[in-house]
Image (cartoon, grey):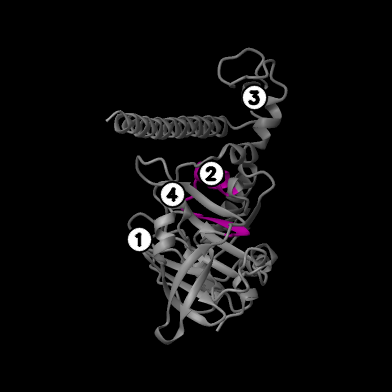
């Protein structure tokens, strides 16, 4: 049995409930194709979508995701349930779905904190974290960067890498951790208060599941040791799942993401690269692209070594990717409208033909 409060229920969701119906609020803990594991006051249930809901939901983003709150009809004797509705989301971490399709994929829903995990070995990558930060800002979650596996790094080197990360992630809290030694766990727990939902994000093998196991106090999630041949972690987690911490708080474990493409991230880019935006206010041209224009304050900062050239290149890369995505979305909308117009014209023509007979 669970209480709604420990699952993360709040007044935001309470206002969306349907108190005079047999539907009860539940939280999605795991998704496996068309089946969902949900948690509610009555316990744990295996759920599927109602026929009407499945028929009405067209975009993929409307389907339940891990962390979502849903309204479900329970079948207690069978430990089964039927989901009839997904409540509006308070926050999310989403990306463009892998591959060529222009669709949004919700990685985790209704999150308060995004722990962006990297390890202090060969996985350490400032540019990758900038990308994660951009998506986290856009989804409305507070970001915390976790530099894990500090036990594999000399103290002096760890301090240097931490400073580099702090310079790349202005104003974002950076925590050094070691799941093996327990370093930094107290800092993580101070954030994971009752009612707070956090998602652990990062590449495969950076130690997300190991950190969650340490917070749980038990080896609930499967983990593997790093490969001795190349010092890289090995992929273990295969599905996203939501877990409750014994001291309060909710965490969502996620598999490592090989592709992390942006999705409607213009605001996130502005937040992640706030230093570049501040410099841009002093450029000679208001629409300066910071490439070859005269009087560019951003490129002047690079030349003066007060702005990292690779950081500016990362900014350009993410902006270009966002513009390309926007163009694809606009083209998809125009194509959809054209198809709808053609269907309407066919209906009108058919109507006139029928009247003329």
- Dot label at residue 59: 4
Disc 1 secondary structure class: loop
Query: Which quarter of the rendered picture does the N terminus lie within?
Result: bottom right
Q: Which residues are magenta?
A: 110-136
Looking at marks 3 and 1 on the same chain, the residue that comes earlier in the sequence is marked by 1
What residue is disc 1 on? 227
Q: Quadrant of the C terminus?
A: top left
Quarter of the image for residue 30 reads bottom left
- Residue 180 in sight from this viewpoint: no
Nearer to us: label 3 or label 1: 3
> Which corner quadrant of the image does residue 303 belong to?
top right
Residue at 60% across / 65% down in the picture?
197
Among the two numbered marks 4 and 2 on one chain, the one whose residue lies closer to the N terminus: 4
Residue 103 vs 252, above or below: the answer is: above
Rendering quarter of residue 351 = top left
**Residue 88 can be seen in this image:** yes
**Residue 116 is inside the magenta segment:** yes
10 Å crowding of disc 4: few (<14), some (14-19), many (20+): few
């Amino acid at each position: 049995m669970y209480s709604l409060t420990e699952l993360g229920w709040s007044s935001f969701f309470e206002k969306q409930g349907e108190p005079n119906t047999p539907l009860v609020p539940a939280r999605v803990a795991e998704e496996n194709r068309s089946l969902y594991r949900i948690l509610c006051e009555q316990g744990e249930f295996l759920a599927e979508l109602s026929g009407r809901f499945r028929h009405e939901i067209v975009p993929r983003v409307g389907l339940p995701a891990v962390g979502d709150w849903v309204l479900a009809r329970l079948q207690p004797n069978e430990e089964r349930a039927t989901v009839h509705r997904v409540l509006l989301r308070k926050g999310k971490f989403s990306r463009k779905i892998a591959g060529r399709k222009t669709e949004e994929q919700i990685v985790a829903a209704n999150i308060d904190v995004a722990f962006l995990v990297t390890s202090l070995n060969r996985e350490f990558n400032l540019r990758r974290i900038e990308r994660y930060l951009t998506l986290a800002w856009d989804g409305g979650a507070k970001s915390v960067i976790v530099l894990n596996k500090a036990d594999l790094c000399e103290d002096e080197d760890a301090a240097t890498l931490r400073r580099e990360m702090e310079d790349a992630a202005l104003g974002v809290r950076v925590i050094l951790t070691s799941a093996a030694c327990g370093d930094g766990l107290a800092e993580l727990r101070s954030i994971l208060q009752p009612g707070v939902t956090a998602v652990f994000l990062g590449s495969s093998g950076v130690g997300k599941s190991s950190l969650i196991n340490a917070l749980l106090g038990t080896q609930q999630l499967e983990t593997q040791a790093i490969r001795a041949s190349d010092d890289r972690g090995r992929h273990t987690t295969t599905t996203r799942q939501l877990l409750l911490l014994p001291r309060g708080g909710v965490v969502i474990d996620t598999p490592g993401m090989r592709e992390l493409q942006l999705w409607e991230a213009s605001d996130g880019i502005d937040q992640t690269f706030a230093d570049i935006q501040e410099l841009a206010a002093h450029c000679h041209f208001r629409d300066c692209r910071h490439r070859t224009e005269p009087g560019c304050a951003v490129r002047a900062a690079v030349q003066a070594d007060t702005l990292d050239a690779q950081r500016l290149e990362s900014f350009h890369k993410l902006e270009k990717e966002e513009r390309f995505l926007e163009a694809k979305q606009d083209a998809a909308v125009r194509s959809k409208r054209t198809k709808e117009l053609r269907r309407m014209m066919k209906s009108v023509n058919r109507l006139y033909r029928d009247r003329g007979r």
